[in-house]
Amino acid sequence: MELRSLDDLLVLYIKERMPSDDMVRQLEVVIRSLRSFTRSSLLDELTREALFGWRDHLLKERQVAVATWNNYLRHLKVLINFAKDSGVLDFSLNGVKSLPDYKRGVRVLNDSHIQRIIGWLRHPEQEAMPGWFWESVCKMLYYSGMRRRQLVGLCWRDIDQGEGVIRLDADSSKTKRAWSIPMTQPLSSVLADVHRMTRAINKPCNPNDQVFNITLFNERYHGRRMTVDHVSAAFRRIREKTGVDVSAHRFRHTFASQLAKQGRIRELQQVLGHRDVRTTLGYVQPDMKGMSELMSGLSTI
């Protein structure tokens, strides 16, 4: 296969590496952005100067976040390194470094935020969303700490009532590995509600069917499966209407920060599915009250 462009390279990468749908979508976004700036996706026109020009365009003119540029660069390196390893391209991005991203501290949802969100979803005007569905999504994220893609990828076969666990599939995992989390009583209640509402509209809950599928309950959604974009769009609407800066990932941070107060970080690491405990610690919001109690333990001088 003759490779002339990044598009050709992506086709080969998909064929040989079989990446996840999320990875493919992100690589497509990166290629479109680079092509839009350089007016070309030809491999022989891919130079460091062109990449730095693209970076400056994104950061200074488009004013994208540093984290976005770093994400684009990381995904582009995946393609370029694949091409180099395959012997089809003699070009390297090893010297092109990510930019430092001075992030604000992790922000979490407090009880007031969550009650405001649920209160808005329970208002009769939200019946069309429908509000009960997105309330179930919020509760699932809050009580499990799972990622957005894991919620979308969750199927009825993953709910093991006998063992009392929820199995998180490797295909929907960021780390490409599967693990299980305990099915606590709040999670069991959420799943029972979704199951009951799905059966109420005469839809089956077959093993391979999604647990959370908004297309079953709102005809405005096209297709037969719920996607991560549907989740993001719903949270944008909730954000606009409630004034609460909410997202699926903010629920994950909230979950981690609340449970971290128990001090059982290793077990929290397992629940979140992190390979490195340092990643888990990065999810934790400092507890000002706990820090105050800690500092109060000093002797008076």
Image (cartoon, rainbow, N blue to C red):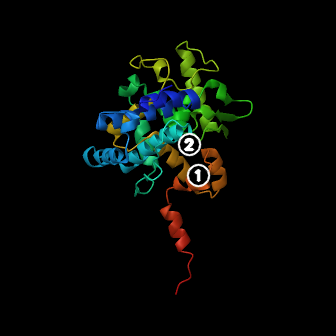
The kind of residue on which mark 1 rests is Leu
* Label placed on residue 14: none
- Residue drawn 52% across the image and 44% down it: 252
| Residue 267 percent coordinates (x, y) | 66, 51
Label 2 belongs to which residue?
145
Residue 60 visible to an observer of this rendering: yes
Please indicate whether residue 244 sits to the left or right of residue 180 in the image: left
Quadrant for residue 121, please give it: top left
Q: Assign a secondary structure to mark 2.
A: loop
Q: Position of residue 67 (x, y in %)?
A: 40, 48
Disc 2 or disc 1, which is closer to the eye?
Answer: 2
**Circle 1 residues within 10 Å: few <14, some 14–19, many ≥20:** some
Residue 259 disc label? 1
Residue type at numbered disc 2: Gly
Front position in the image: 135 or 102: 102
Residue 10 % position (x, y):
47, 30
Point out residue 221 in the picture as x, y percentages from the top left corner: 41, 20
Furthest toward the bottom, the residue is 301
